[in-house]
C-alpha cells in the first residue's frame, strides 16, 4: 500500500490537485513505465527521430546532456518534453554557471573561487546564473550545489569544486546557491552525500571512505546536510562513499567487510539520511558507471540493491538495455519488490508535481521559445563574473617582494603553461589561460612561451644559469590542472627529462606561480616565492590576475583552504 501521506509533507508540500495528478498517474502506469521512471540516462542524440525513439523505448524519468550550444540543447529538451507522456527531469551539472549545460553559457566561477571572495552574494549569483541560463534551454534539474568539505589536499576530484574546508562557509554559500537556483525554478540535487573530501582517492575509480567518527561527522558534514535538508530541497545525490562509523551506528552487528558505499547502504540511506536527517525527498545515485559502484557487487545485483537500500533513481547506465533488463529480472525473482519500486516512483512523481512540471507541460511553457536564449552568456552575467574574479584572486605569498611587476624591471618573460596532458575529464568549460601571453604583451613585455612540443635539448643538458638569464628576466608559471574524473592524482607532472620545465633557476631568476585551478600546487613548487591562487580558468579571471600583478588592483581574495598543505617550507 502506497503511503500517499508523504506527498503533503516537506519537501513536496503538494496541493490537492497535485496529489490527484500523482495518484492518477502512478495508478495508471504499467510496470515498464515505472521501471523507466527510476532511470536518468545520459543522452547525446540531437536528431528528433532518434530522441523520439529513445523516449518510446525507455520512457526515462529524465536525461542529462553534456554541454552543447544553447540552441541545440534547448531544441533537444523541447522534443523530449513534447514526446514524453510524463514530464521529464532535464538535468545538468550546474556547478560553475550556465556553462554546465550550454557551451556558450556563462562560466561564472568555481565554488572555491566564489568562497574566496567571502561574499555570499557570489554564492547566490552562481546559483542564479546557473538557473537562469539552464531555464532558458529547458533544463530544470541541477546536479549541484556541492556540499562537500575539502579536508584532504590530496583528493583529486574535489578541491575547487567545493566551497572549502570551513563548515559554516560551505553552509552559507550552498544555501545562497540554492536560493539562486530556486528563483529560476530549477530543482537542485545537492551532492555528494554522505560527504566527499576526506579520502585522498576518487570515487570514480574506487569506493572512497568518509572515515570520520560519528561525533566528527555530526560536527562537520552532518551540520551541512541538516541545513540542506531543512531548506526543503527536493533531491539529494548520494556518492559511492563509505561511512563506516554511521553504518555501524545503525547496525552494530555489521561486519567491516559488509559495509557498503552509501548508494548501496540501507544504514546510510534509511538510517542517516531518512531517519536522522529527516529527508523525505528523492534520493538519486551518483553515476553508476563509476568504479566505486560497479566494483561493490555484480551489476545485475547492484541496481536492484541500490533501490532496495533506499535510492529512488539510478543515474546513468553502462548498457541501458541490459540495465533495464536487470531491473525486470529483479522484479520477477523478488530481489526488487514492487512495493519498493512504487515508493521510488511515487517520490519521483511527487518531485515533478512540486516543480509544477505537469502544469508547465500542459500550457506549453515547460521549455521556453528561442527568445529566452538571449540570457545565455549575457553581458550582465559576464559582468558578475568579472566582479567575482576581482574579489576572488588570492595572493598566497610574495616573500621575495616581487610584486608589482613592470616591463622596466622584467622586460623578457618566460611563460610556462602547466596543463592537463591526458584530458577526457568532465570539465565545466574550456580553459582560457592562453590569453595570458596576449595580456602580458599588451603591457609591453616580451613573452616567450615554453614549447613542450619541441624541447630545447641545449637548454636541458649543455648550458646553465647564464644562458637562462640571457633569455628571460622573469619566469611565470600558469597552472590549469583542473579537477576531473578518472584521475588518481592531481599533481604537477614536470617534463620527465631532467624536469626541464621545473623552476630550477628560482634562486637566480625571479619566478611567479599562478594557479587557475587546483589551489595546492605549493606541494610541488614550494620553492617559488610568489604564489597566486585564482581558482577558475576564465578570461575574466586571467584579466584580473594581470591587473593585480601589475599593481593596478589589490588582491582581495582569502583562501578557503590551507594552500600550504601543512608542509614545512611552503610558506617561505
Image (cartoon, rainbow, N blue to C red):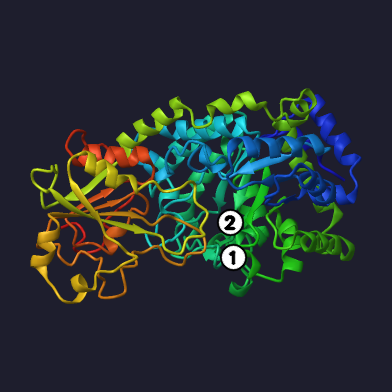
In space, the residues marked 2 and 1 are separated at their CA atoms by 9 Å
Quadrant (top left, top right, bottom left, bottom right) of the N terminus: top right
Quadrant (top left, top right, bottom left, bottom right) of the C terminus: bottom left
- In the picture, measured across the screen, residue 506 lies left or right of residue 283, that is left
Callout 1 secondary element: helix
Q: In the rendered structure, which disc, 2 or 1, sits on the residue that comes first in sequence?
A: 2
**For mark 1, does the 10 Å Cα neighbourhood hold few (<14), some (14 to 19), or many (20 or more) residues?**
many
Residue at left offset 29%, top offset 75%: 497
* Picture disc at residue 239: 2
- In the picture, measured across the screen, residue 37 lies left or right of residue 216, that is right
* Picture disc at residue 439: none
Name the spot of residue 333 as percent of width and height, x first: 88, 66
Determine if residue 140 is in view.
no
Callout 2 secondary element: loop
Along the viewing direction, whichever of 248 and 207 lies nearer the viewer:
207
Vertical comparison of 286 with 6: above or below: below
Mark 1 lies on residue: 292
Name the spot of residue 505 as percent of width and height, x first: 14, 65
Residue at left offset 36%, top offset 40%: 539
- In the picture, measured across the screen, residue 439 lies left or right of residue 143, that is left
The quadrant in which residue 93 appears is top right
Amino acid at each position: 500500500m502506497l503511503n500517499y501521506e508523504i506527498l503533503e509533507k516537506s519537501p513536496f508540500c503538494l496541493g490537492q490537485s497535485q496529489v490527484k495528478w500523482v495518484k492518477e498517474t502512478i495508478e495508471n502506469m504499467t510496470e515498464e513505465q515505472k521501471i523507466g521512471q527510476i532511470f536518468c540516462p545520459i543522452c547525446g542524440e540531437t536528431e528528433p527521430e532518434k530522441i523520439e525513439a529513445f523516449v518510446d523505448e525507455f520512457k526515462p524519468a529524465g536525461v542529462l546532456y553534456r554541454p552543447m550550444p544553447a540552441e541545440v540543447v534547448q531544441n533537444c529538451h523541447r522534443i523530449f518534453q513534447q514526446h514524453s507522456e510524463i514530464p521529464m527531469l532535464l538535468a545538468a551539472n550546474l556547478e560553475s554557471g550556465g556553462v554546465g549545460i550550454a557551451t556558450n553559457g556563462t562560466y561564472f566561477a568555481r565554488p572555491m573561487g566564489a568562497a574566496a571572495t567571502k561574499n555570499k552574494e557570489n554564492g547566490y549569483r552562481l546559483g542564479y546564473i546557473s538557473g537562469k541560463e539552464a531555464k532558458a534551454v529547458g533544463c530544470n534539474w541541477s546536479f549541484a550545489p556541492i556540499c562537500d568539505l575539502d579536508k584532504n589536499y590530496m583528493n583529486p576530484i574535489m578541491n575547487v569544486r567545493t566551497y572549502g574546508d570551513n563548515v559554516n562557509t560551505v553552509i552559507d554559500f550552498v544555501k545562497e546557491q540554492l536560493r539562486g537556483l530556486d528563483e529560476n525554478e530549477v530543482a537542485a540535487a545537492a551532492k555528494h552525500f554522505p560527504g566527499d573530501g576526506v579520502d585522498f582517492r576518487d570515487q570514480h575509480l574506487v569506493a572512497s571512505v568518509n572515515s570520520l567518527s560519528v561525533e566528527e561527522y555530526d560536527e562537520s558534514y552532518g551540520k551541512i546536510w541538516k541545513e540542506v535538508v531543512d531548506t526543503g530541497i527536493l533531491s539529494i545525490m548520494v556518492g559511492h562513499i563509505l561511512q563506516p562509523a554511521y553504518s555501524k551506528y545503525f547496525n552494530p552487528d555489521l561486519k567491516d567487510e559488509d559495509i557498503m558505499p552509501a548508494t548501496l547502504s540501507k544504514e546510510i540511506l534509511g538510517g542517516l539520511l531518512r531517519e536522522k536527517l529527516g529527508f523525505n525527498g528523492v534520493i538519486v545515485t551518483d553515476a553508476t558507471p563509476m568504479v566505486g559502484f560497479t566494483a561493490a557487487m555484480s551489476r545485475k545485483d547492484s541496481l536492484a540493491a541500490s533501490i532496495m537500500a533506499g535510492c529512488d533513481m539510478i543515474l546513468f547506465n553502462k548498457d541501458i538495455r541490459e540495465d533495464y533488463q536487470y531491473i525486470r529480472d529483479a522484479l520477477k525473482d523478488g530481489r526488487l519488490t514492487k512495493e519498493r519500486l512504487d515508493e521510488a516512483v511515487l517520490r519521483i512523481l511527487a518531485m515533478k508535481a512540486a516543480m509544477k512540471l505537469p502544469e508547465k507541460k500542459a500550457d506549453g511553457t515547460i521549455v521556453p521559445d528561442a527568445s529566452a536564449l538571449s540570457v545565455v552568456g549575457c553581458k550582465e552575467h559576464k559582468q558578475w563574473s568579472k566582479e567575482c574574479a576581482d574579489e576572488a584572486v588570492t595572493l598566497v605569498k610574495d616573500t621575495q617582494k616581487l610584486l608589482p611587476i613592470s616591463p622596466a624591471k622584467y622586460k623578457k618573460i618566460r611563460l610556462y603553461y602547466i596543463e592537463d596532458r591526458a584530458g577526457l575529464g568532465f570539465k565545466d568549460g574550456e580553459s582560457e589561460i592562453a590569453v595570458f601571453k596576449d595580456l602580458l604583451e599588451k603591457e609591453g613585455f616580451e613573452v616567450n612561451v615554453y614549447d613542450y612540443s619541441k624541447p630545447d635539448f641545449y637548454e636541458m643538458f649543455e648550458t646553465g644559469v647564464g644562458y637562462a638569464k640571457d633569455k628571460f628576466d622573469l619566469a611565470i608559471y600558469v597552472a590549469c590542472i583542473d579537477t576531473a574524473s578518472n584521475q588518481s592524482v592531481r599533481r604537477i607532472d614536470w617534463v620527465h627529462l631532467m624536469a626541464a620545465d621545473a623552476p630550477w633557476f628560482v634562486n637566480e631568476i625571479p619566478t611567479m606561480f599562478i594557479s587557475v585551478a587546483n589551489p595546492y600546487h605549493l606541494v610541488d613548487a614550494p620553492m617559488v616565492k610568489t604564489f597566486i591562487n585564482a581558482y577558475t580558468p576564465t578570461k575574466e579571471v586571467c584579466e584580473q590576475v594581470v591587473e593585480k600583478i601589475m599593481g593596478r588592483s589589490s588582491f582581495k581574495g582569502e583562501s578557503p583552504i590551507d594552500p600550504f598543505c601543512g608542509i614545512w617550507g611552503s610558506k617561505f
